Image (cartoon, grey):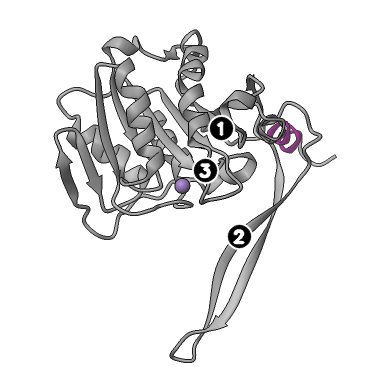
Amino acid sequence: MKDRLPDLARARVLITNDDGVNAPGLKLLERVIRPLVREVWVVAPETEQSAAGHSLTLRRPLRLRKISGRRFAVDGTPTDCVLLGVKKVLEDRPPDLVLSGINRGGNLGEDVTYSGTIAAAMEATLLGFPAVALSQVSDDRRAVKWATAEHWFGPVLDSLSAHSWPPNVFINVNFPDVPARSVKGIEITRQGQRKISGDLKEGVDPRGETFYWIGTQRFLEDPRRRGTDLNAVKRGAISITPLTLDLTHGATVRALRKGPP
Ligand code: MN
């Protein structure tokens, strides 16, 4: 166990997201982290990259646009942003901490496999830096309760800074969709499970060609399973889930190694 949050007052922090460089959640993250650390650097996608997953742009060149002193935009994915942030923008001295978010909408259960927010934290972890992904759960995209994430960001960081975790682990934080004063504390959780039933729209474009459009994802979850991220936010608690990059399922490895029964 060696990775832990650095001494924040002296830290150089790289922040990114998957909602794009102009997203309100990124601006909020900048605002809440800035007073706590020495330096904040932003390297974020030019346009929204939600559900981009851990994709890397390989088949075209990337452009890095300097917006102001410590703010940059990349015409690529969140993973591209972390890579360019570390290898180019901060090439003189690497970051002490990478934060991703604050995402508009939760990253719960199997969401983490689609999420660009989570992928940015994964990339930072692969490059060897402590990383935290942050998301504000919301049922209504037009009325996100940002004040909840804003109010509880400090306590969440405090609860993490007392601990350390192995180098292939990163932290997934979800703020529940309730007003800040109604939050039922901070819980350490497991990744939950929910079956995704996607709404697939079919139509005909102006040229007469059929198209398909992946719409709202409906989630059939079992909120009774205690101890999961889904259960915590459903009850109005903040969920903190340590995730690991190793997707191996140990019990199945052991069973298969035993050979046929
Ligand atoms: Mn997003």
Quarter location, residue 111: top right
The disc at residue 174 is 1
Q: Residue at x 63, y 57 (%)?
A: 217
Q: Is residue 12 left or right of residue 125?
A: left
The disc at residue 144 is 3
Q: Nearer the viewer, residue 25 or 142?
A: 142
Residue 86: percent from left, percent from top: 25, 32
* Measured Cα–Cα span from mark 2 to mark 1: 20 Å
- Amino acid type at image mark 1: Asn
Q: Nearer the viewer, residue 181 or 203?
A: 181
Foreground mark, 3 or 1? Answer: 3
Which callout, 2 or 3, points at the residue further toward the start of the chain? Answer: 3
Provide the major secondary structure of the magenta segment.
Answer: helix
Q: Residue at x 33, y 28 (%)?
A: 31
**How crowded is the residue under tag 1: few (<14 C-alpha within 10 Å), some, or many (20+)?**
many
- Which residue in the protein does label 2 denote? 216
Q: Which portion, as a residue range, is magenta? A: 251-258
Residue 19: percent from left, percent from top: 40, 48
